[in-house]
Image (tube, helix red, strand yellow):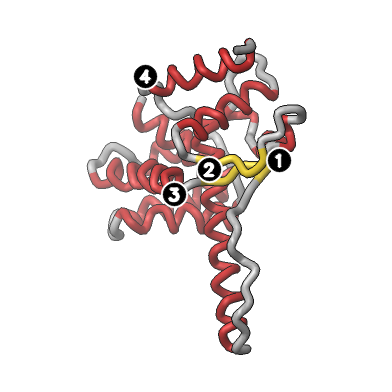
């Protein structure tokens, strides 16, 4: 076993010891979930067109995959650790998710890791739903208030959207939370994921 494999094994063992999921991992899973939802909605539109034209052919049967390089570009600096990190750190985070069957690897290019392609699994989708359902629980249990949103760093427009989400959730079933979060990601981009991660972490501190 080489040094790199030993590092991966150590990271996997840490996860087995119930080390909490990291902000980077939540970001990766949530982003992939949002892309999967968008692709599914596209597929439904295309399938409706195909059905209306009486064609039996459909090309939309694949998962949404993203490369290590692309996800490294998307991850905001605010959720990166304070210490200096490199490609290996992000790759290890991904491999932990893979080990726990939260993502799958489409192409694992060991010679050129930045070309590694990965996608979210059903277990990963379920975990994202559970993570953001916790927001609804915290609001219902009065552990999360509008003032907590004001204290967050972030774009005012996103905070205003989050306040609207907070008010709506008081009158909605928690099953609606993930759909509302994904709608926010569609409108404001990945920045919404970061604000939500910060909100979840601040409400548990």
Residues at discs 3 and 4 in contact (Cβ within 8 Å): no
Lower position in the chain sequence, tag 1 or tag 4: 4
Residue at which label 4 appears: 17
Lower position in the chain sequence, tag 2 or tag 3: 3
Residue at which label 2 appears: 193
Q: Measure how far apart labels 2 and 4 are at the Cα level.
A: 26 Å
- The spot of residue 204 in percent (x, y) is 34, 29
Where is the N terminus found, in terms of image quarters? top right
- The spot of residue 10 in percent (x, y) is 50, 14
Q: Is label 4 in a helix, a strand or a loop?
A: loop
Q: Nearer the viewer, mark 1 or mark 3?
A: 3
Q: Measure how far apart labels 1 and 4 are at the Cα level.
A: 30 Å
- The spot of residue 18 in percent (x, y) is 36, 23
Q: Could you tell me which residue is drawn at 49 percent across and 36 percent down?
A: 26
| Direction from residue 143 to residue 98 in the image, left or right | right
Residue at which label 3 appears: 122
Q: Nearer the viewer, residue 128 or 100?
A: 100
| Direction from residue 141 to residue 62 in the image, left or right | right
Q: Is label 1 in a helix, a strand or a loop?
A: helix
Residues at discs 2 and 1 in contact (Cβ within 8 Å): no
Q: Which mark is residue 70?
A: 1
Q: Nearer the viewer, residue 196 or 6?
A: 6
Residues at discs 1 and 4 in contact (Cβ within 8 Å): no
Q: Could you tell me which residue is drawn at 54 percent across and 34 percent down?
A: 153
Lower position in the chain sequence, tag 1 or tag 3: 1
Lower position in the chain sequence, tag 2 or tag 1: 1
Lower position in the chain sequence, tag 2 or tag 4: 4
Q: Measure how far apart labels 2 and 1 are at the Cα level.
A: 16 Å
Q: Nearer the viewer, residue 132 or 25?
A: 25
């Amino acid at each position: 076993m080489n040094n790199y494999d030993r590092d991966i094994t150590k990271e996997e063992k840490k996860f087995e010891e119930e080390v909490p999921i990291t902000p980077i991992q939540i970001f990766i899973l949530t982003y992939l979930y949002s892309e999967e939802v968008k692709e599914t909605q596209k597929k439904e539109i295309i399938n409706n067109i195909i059905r209306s034209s009486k064609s039996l052919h459909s090309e939309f049967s694949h998962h949404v995959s993203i490369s290590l390089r692309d996800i490294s570009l998307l991850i905001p600096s605010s959720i990166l650790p304070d210490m200096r990190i490199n490609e290996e750190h992000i790759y290890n985070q991904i491999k932990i998710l893979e080990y726990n069957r939260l993502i799958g690897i489409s192409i694992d290019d060991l010679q050129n890791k930045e070309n590694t392609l990965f996608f979210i699994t059903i277990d990963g989708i379920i975990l994202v739903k559970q993570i953001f359902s916790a927001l609804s629980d915290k609001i219902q249990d009065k552990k999360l208030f509008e003032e907590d949103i004001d204290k967050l760093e972030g774009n005012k427009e996103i905070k205003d959207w989050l306040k609207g989400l907070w008010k709506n959730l008081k009158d909605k079933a928690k099953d609606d939370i993930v759909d509302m979060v994904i709608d926010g990601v569609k409108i404001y981009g990945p920045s919404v994921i970061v604000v939500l991660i910060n909100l979840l972490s601040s409400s548990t501190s």
